[in-house]
Amino acid sequence: MLPVLLAAASAAPVPEKVPAAQASIAPFTLPPNVTFDTTPHSWLAQHWPWLTHTLAGGFVVLGVLLVFFLAIQTTKQEGLSGTLGGRVESSTRRLGLDAQIARVTQTVAVLFVFFALLVSLSGI
């Protein structure tokens, strides 16, 4: 088996070495048999491409907003008791800044999931 491998290795052509100065100048070209399928695959992407791209853009913006709002939230109660028990708030007084940020974060998270569903159904 080893002589067969050695014979096959010796029969293979040896590529020419290109000097480093010429290697950076040579353009990169794809082989002629490589093709890319750029046609849209869903009805929505074929007929309303602006809508699919708008959904994808909104999805990206909501993702960035969700990360931002999650990053600026502060936790008042650390540990397992705060996670399980939560905090009792009166419903009659106005929400503080932390509660408002939490409510906006929840809204952005729901919109993010909704946009993820729409983007996945649009076929892009």
Image (cartoon, helix red, strand yellow):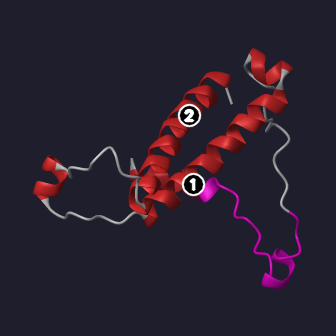
Contact flag, marks 2 and 1 (Cβ < 8 Å):
no
At x 51% / y 52%, what residue is drawn? Answer: 66
Q: Is residue 56 visible?
A: yes
Q: Is residue 74 left or right of residue 32?
A: left
Question: Which residue was labeled with disc 1?
Answer: 65
Query: Secondary structure under badge 2?
Result: helix
Q: Work out whether 99 lies above or below 58.
A: below
Q: Nearer the viewer, residue 13 or 30?
A: 30
Query: Secondary structure under badge 1?
Result: helix
Question: Which residue was labeled with disc 2?
Answer: 116
Residue 22: x and y in percent read 86, 79
SS assignment for the magenta stretch, majority: loop
**Label 2 – label 1 distance at C-alpha:** 14 Å
Segment colored magenta: 10-27
Crowdedness of circle 1 by 10 Å Cα count: few (<14), some, many (20+)? some
The amino acid type found where label 1 is placed reads Leu
Q: Quadrant of residue 76 in the image?
A: bottom left
At x 89% / y 75%, what residue is drawn? Answer: 25
* Sequence-first disc among 2 and 1: 1
At x 61% / y 27%, what residue is drawn? Answer: 118
Q: Nearer the viewer, residue 120 or 109?
A: 109
Crowdedness of circle 2 by 10 Å Cα count: few (<14), some, many (20+)? some
Residue 56: x and y in percent read 69, 39
Tell me if residue 55 is in the magenta stretch.
no
Q: Is residue 96 left or right of residue 82?
A: right
Q: Is residue 60 left or right of residue 74?
A: right
The amino acid type found where label 2 is placed reads Ala
Q: Nearer the viewer, residue 7 or 63?
A: 63
